[in-house]
Amino acid sequence: MLSKTFDPKTVEPRLYGAWERSGAFAPTNDPAAAPFSIVIPPPNVTGSLHIGHALNVTLQDVLVRFERMRGRAALWLPGADHAGIATQMVVERELAARGNMSRRDMGREAFVERVWEWKEAAHRTIDEQLRRLGASCDWGRERFTLDEGLSAAVRKVFVALWRDKLIYRDKRLVNWDPQFQTAISDLEVEQREVEGAYWHFAYPLEDGSGEIVVATSRPETMLADTAVAVHPEDPRYQALIGKCVRLPIVGRPIPIIADDYADPEKGSGAVKITPAHDFNDFKVGQRHRLPMINILDPFARLNENAPPPFRGLDRFEARRRVVAEFERLGLLRGVETVRHAVPHGDRSGVPLEPYLTDQWWVDAKALAGPAIAAVEAGRTVFVPRHWEKTFFEWMRNIEPWCVSRQLWWGHRIPAWWGPDGKAFVAESEGEARRAAFEHYGRDEPLRQDEDVLDTWFSSGLWPFSTLGWPERTADLERFYPTDTLVTGFDIIFFWVARMMMMGLKFMGEVPFRRVFINALVRDAGGMKMSKSKGNVLDPLELVDRYGADALRFTLTAMSGAARDLKLSAQRIEGYRNFGTKLWNAARFCQMNGCERVPGFDPATVSHVHNRWIRGEAAATTRTVTEALDACAFDEAAGAIYRFVWNVFCDWRLEFAKPVLAGADEAAKAETRAAIAWTLDVILRLLHPIMPFLTEELWQATGGEGMLITATWPDLPRSYVDEDARAEMALVIGVIAEGRSVRSELRVPPAARPPLDSVGASPEQRQILEANAAVIQQTLRVGAIRFVDEPEPGSVPYLAEGGTFALPVADHIDIGAERARLDKELAEREADIERAQKKLSNPAFIARAPEEVVGESRERLAEAEDARERLRSVRARLEGVA
RNA sequence: GGACGCGUAGCUCAGCGGGAGAGCACUACGUUGACAUCGUAGGGGUCGCUGGUUCGAUCCCAGCCGCGUCCACCA
């Protein structure tokens, strides 16, 4: 006997263990099974999973369980990302918090060792969380971006790109993070609005004939100015082009140059040029072959290229001193405060500096071409489709990708430097040595590049590196390209785009056929969840409180949200209740002997309730299957929800009660078998979304084997029986409308008046007689009588083309009844008026499609018929009163 | 400045050319019933605004207003 409620706490770990031990998570080896694969977006090993992961993981699991049940060799490959800068930061912070040695004091090897320890623990936590959510991924194939195989793949890709000249070394400005002392890519830059100022400085002309005023928000950079630019056609400055100014404080003469970059509209129209510390100025500097003076060290302190009093100062301190100096010199021409966007490191949160360094670059433009073409050709499709625009927008304007990072945690760049500064890029040190020997004619000492690669470099290989590439493994053959990638829009550039480029370059084929972009989970008020706001919903806490199934169903049902999924505990509670509802329905089945009958064939049922529910089950199955096929997860969840609650529980089980209490043994047997069969279909359809509860019920109801590997329902269209549908529409209609009348007129629930069917057709009479018991019980009425006219004092109502009446004169209030009828009459009048207006428009008759015109006529006829019936009963009511 | 998206019931959203929908919330009634984690019923919206196309617009087009996100921008 099933317990009164489902207890996730005890059931979930037990079932997960059973699934895992059974080997159900691994794809079947059956060669006839078509492959289906998903690679998990590898979570960062920085900590634990948040609610966004829970959504992402749930949707992937829904797909994998669905496809597995459909008989495909379904692989969901799990793993984690080393998340270079993020993880290094977390570990450094932890070291500092515990008062340990800093990274630099520890040294590279010891520090990296320490990060590995952290990684192990974090990775275990993440895997445990995935298990708690019910993720049916194949643990035997789990990968990590820094594991040996993936590291080999990274080296191979790096070397290949180098040989193809798609990776190169270049000295140019990068976004430099002074907190971490590393370069970062454009994508890791976050613009933040901050209070700032523009200082207007006067630069005296060298010949003493005057001055030129420039403005800057970063005064300290003037120490590295190597020119002042004006627009070539700016009449104010024609005479000055070619002259020099003497740079205050520094004393260096710098030229006044003409360049289009100077905008006469802005400020004074003259702009200081600092090629080593500004991206725009860098380009101007290149055009005019200006010297590039770098005045910063990696910590953004001023270096020896700055005048002695400024050396060693922090950039912000230097800023103050420069301003003070201009003031002292009488060259400060004004200050205006402004709010402007300043680039910050997305991880460190400190203002970045454009910084001149040697870095490794990927020619992203060259790799982007095939990726753009693949999406254009529909070889990879985004769901929802509009995200393709975002993808194209970025890919068509892509800039070179800086892939080197001055960090310790990551893939060390496979390049070795010779004594003369020549780089030997190779997959191993041995290979590099051989190349160096060939080059130098003798052994020379080589030093491996200190830098590591951007984390996204290895993530970009994820769909094929995890399947064994560069080996031509069976998995790679079978599961690449993967089918669906489920991920958030925030990493379309970081990750999806990189995988597209790398997959096409190295596999010659797209990495996935479909990209499903899931919403961003926010709190009930639409705010981003963050620890500081205290509005974070921890997935594990929610699983503890409501069970994994409730959380999964909630996330699935709400996944249709375009961008923001506003989650609240209340919603989860609601869907937890849905699980309980199904649980109790199963208890009802169990208590009433609705057990699976071996060999039961739904096609052979004869009772109308069973022919009807069979068709409803088939229709729901089709809806759910099509929805999951299209990644319309919310629609799938909604269809099952409605079928379970509003069809199966509300009607089918209610209808079973009188039958099961009756004496017709054949009807009882068929009803039991059909209900058990329907429950079986429900469990299968719901399993991908609520795996634990359905598996538990499956086993409790004697399902064969485990539900996780049961087959997906495939019910023929012929299961839908239109006659049964029509019959049940009348039965449900007479009950639902009758209930409404009872409720509005406040007929006491305990009253059991007779039900009069007024002027029923022979067909209607036959249906009503056949369903008398269910109508009597469900509508709480006594005898069903067939009459030609409603008796005086009875309350009439319409349902599905039939007229009914409840003789409840003793209970009702004539006024309330009059109001009810008038309200309904008014509704019908409005219908009639609307239809008549439409039909009297000749243009409508002439131009609208025939079906639409016919439909309007039908509607008018129905409304008129209803009006007549209502009028007649209204008149009768007045007679009573 | 560029791009994308969104304004429909109190809330979250679906509908996207022919009678305004769902879930939740709310109100009333109901408990020897599989289920109060429940049942039954009910109230609630000139579908952001203004034009246009059309026989017909919540739906298509244009403009406007409001909101959000991403990209660019530190003279």
Image (spheres, grey):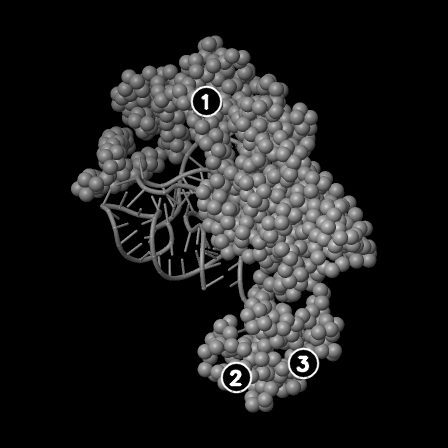
Query: Left or right: A185 with respect to A863?
Result: right
x, y percentage for residue A575? 55, 36
Image spot of residue A496 (x, y percent): 56, 46
The amino acid marked with disc number 2 is Leu
Tag 1 secondary structure = loop
Q: Residue furthest front?
A: A441
Q: Are marks 1 and 2 in contact (CB under 8 Å)?
A: no
Where A139 sits versus A493, above or below? Answer: above
**Label 1 sits on residue:** A715
The crowd level at tag 2 (other Cα within 10 Å; few <14, some 14-19, many 20+) is some
Question: Could you tell me which chain the residue with mark 2 belongs to?
Answer: A
Q: Nearer the viewer, mark 3 or mark 1?
A: 3
Q: Secondary structure at mark 3?
A: loop
Whether residue A841 is visible:
no
Q: Do dots 3 and 1 share one subunit? A: yes
Q: Nearer the viewer, residue A417 or A65?
A: A417
Parent chain of label 1: A
Q: Which mark is residue A240?
A: 2
Q: Depth-wise, is mark 1 or mark 2 nearer the camera? A: 2
Chain designation of label 3: A
Pointers 1 and 2 within a single chain: yes
Residue A187 numbered mark, or none: none
Please state which amino acid type lies under the numbered disc 1: Leu
| Residue type at numbered disc 3 | Val
Circle 3 residue: A250
